[in-house]
Amino acid sequence: MSVNPFSLDGKVALVTGANSGLGRAVALALRDAGALVAIGGRRADRNARVLELLGNSSAAFELDVSDEGSVERAVAGTVERYGRLDILINNAGLGQRASVMELDLATWRQVIDINLTGAFLCTKYAARRMKGQGAGKIVNVSSIYGMVAPSKGLQVAYTVAKHGVIGLTKVNAVELAPLGIQVNAIVPGWYFTEMTEELRGTAFEQSVIRRTPAGRWGGALDLVGTCVYLSSAASDYVNGAVITVDGGYAVSDGLERT
């Protein structure tokens, strides 16, 4: 009997920032692939709503990824509930828009803490558990702004943090590989989620469509396949990879196609 390399049967996953948007879609996709899924988010009410969608076999933790104690408790709680931790999806994020000349230090620190330091802290505690198992998968969700800069700048801390997530992916992939742990990054392009819905119908939406060879924005289902792949045995020899899931946005020169 052949074994499905994409199956997550018996695996345990922790998804951060999973109470809305892409994180919620990823959590549901991992469950559908057979994983037992724990979600982490700061808002208990949103966590509860997603938990209803995931079902009784799932768990939710109030998680602030910028708080080391909160991270340690969520990872420990996942292991206490399921006995192990096989998959970590570092998805929690926070955007901002301000000039480098105006951005206050408190906002800079908050955006860096949630987008970058949070991924570091979650990796730190998850990898300790995975080391004892001799295997694990860590998937970091970066952004197209982890590879390029916004056309007008402004998203200073977010852009720096998402570039940092890619660096974090590479250095941890090298260190953790001998422990049987693969660390990879996904780079989403422009997707419609709760955070970007306000851009629908705008000139900016059309600008993105013109640059994107696929000719459209992404939806949550466009991302989940890559995430399941990087969480499964199918990617056991993939390590330190940075995979764009952006409809070709990053490789386009942005000129009008005539």
Image (spheres, helix red, strand yellow):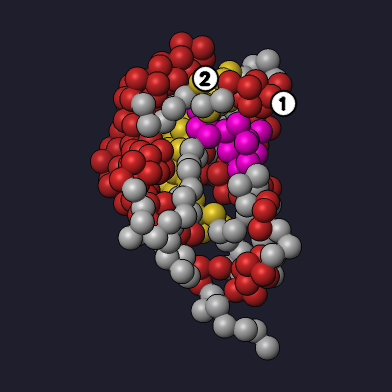
Q: Residue furthest top?
A: 80
Is 67 in front, or is 109? 109
Alpha carbon separation for disc pair 1 and 2: 15 Å
Nearer to me, 122 or 42 = 42
Q: Residues within 10 Å of mark 2 (few under 14, many from 20)?
A: many
Give the image quarter of residue 73.
top left
Which label was assigned to residue 250? none
The relative height of residue 98 versus residue 81 in the rendered view (above or below) is: below
Q: Give residue 174's position: percent from left, percent from top.
A: 28, 45
Mark 1, Cα crowd under 10 Å, few <14 / some 14-19 / many 20+, is: few
Please name the residue that numbered disc 2 is placed on.
61
Query: Please, what secondary structure does the residue beneath circle 1 have?
Result: helix
Q: Amino acid at mark 2?
A: Phe
Image coordinates for residue 123, horizontal then vertical, percent: 36, 33
Residue sitting at x 38%, y 39%: 110
Magenta region? 11-28
- Secondary structure under tag 2 reads strand
